[in-house]
Amino acid sequence: MTLIPLPALRDNYIWLLHDQGHALVVDPGDAGPVWDVLRHDSLVLSTILVTHHHTDHTGGVADLQQATGAAVYGPAGLPPLPCPWIGLHDSDIVQALGHRFAVMHIPGHTADHIAYFGPCDDDEPLLFCGDTLFGAGCGRLFEGTPAQMLASLTRLAALPDATRVCSAHEYTVDGLRFAHWLEPENAYVADRLAWALARRASHLPTLPSTLGLEKSTNPFLRTHQPAVVSAVLPAMQLRCAANPDPVSVFAALRTLKDQF
Ligand code: ZN
Ligand code: FE
């Protein structure tokens, strides 16, 4: 199967997966870039997956569905779409392109947010994580609490390290600049920042990454690391804490990133 990140809108990626005949897209905020690939590669769109209700993820869904008859899936809590769609809950399975994708409810960025993980039998499975996990970052907490987001990210972090992380925005350089400021001694962060800057200078995507790489470079998956904890202590108005509460560390980290 072929995986393509389609740049869309300002800094979104619409992920397109195809088997030379049929295609699946995730979060088509704009139908235009999807049409270009379907025509150019003579693909039939069979499935549309939506991670959450923001319009930069749903704006192209109805056009694509009406023209192709593709099956549309989204979180059960999604405000109704102007086309037929199927609502999903945690641990549901979606069949697409002959493969199984598992649904994970991961609230925090929005209350309805879900991720798709699969194919379930692949050595390097894909994680379509929308605006929950970014390259070296995580989504802003628009509808959720720090505790919810930390729990959601902890669930994602338990997936295999080889999982390919397919986020919905190109925010990696921004995330790595913050990570480098937090953990200047972390060589994985420094290396990834240099690599990401070179990729972006050539207008190439920095995604997908892997969950293994995120675990070594993404501060929001590293709230248990002593270096990250000591970097956020001043923001927590603490000078030292032997066992800081992980949710408080996460909340302070999210606030620091919002202000960075
Ligand atoms: Zn969003
Ligand atoms: Fe978004």
Image (cartoon, rainbow, N blue to C red):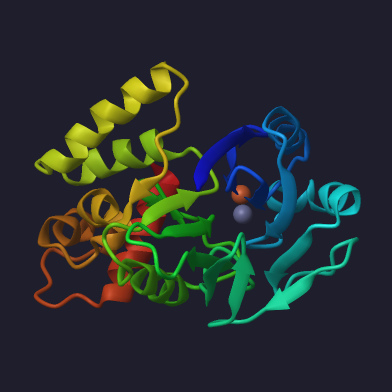
Where is residue 99? Give x, y as percent: 54, 66
Residue 148 versus residue 219 in the image, above or below: below
Q: Residue furthest top?
A: 202
Q: Quadrant of residue 92?
A: bottom right
Left or right, 66 with respect to 29, comes to right
Of 25 and 130, nearer the camera is 25
Number of numbered discs present? 0
Of 217 and 71, nearer the camera is 71
Residue 143 versus residue 21 in the image, above or below: below
Left or right, 88 with respect to 39, comes to left
Of 174 and 192, nearer the camera is 192
Q: Residue at x 37, y 24 (%)?
A: 199
Residue 169 visible in the shown view: yes
Where is residue 15? Give x, y as percent: 58, 46
Where is residue 230? Give x, y as percent: 14, 58
Of 209 and 248, nearer the camera is 209
Give the quarter the ligand 1 occupies: bottom right
Q: Residue at x 59, y 64 (%)?
A: 98
Left or right, 205 with respect to 233, comes to right
Where is residue 166? Give x, y as percent: 47, 50
- Quarter of the figure with the C terminus: top left
Q: Residue at x 64, y 72 (%)?
A: 112
Q: Residue at x 89, y 47 (%)?
A: 67
Residue 76 visible in the shown view: no
Q: Residue furthest front?
A: 21
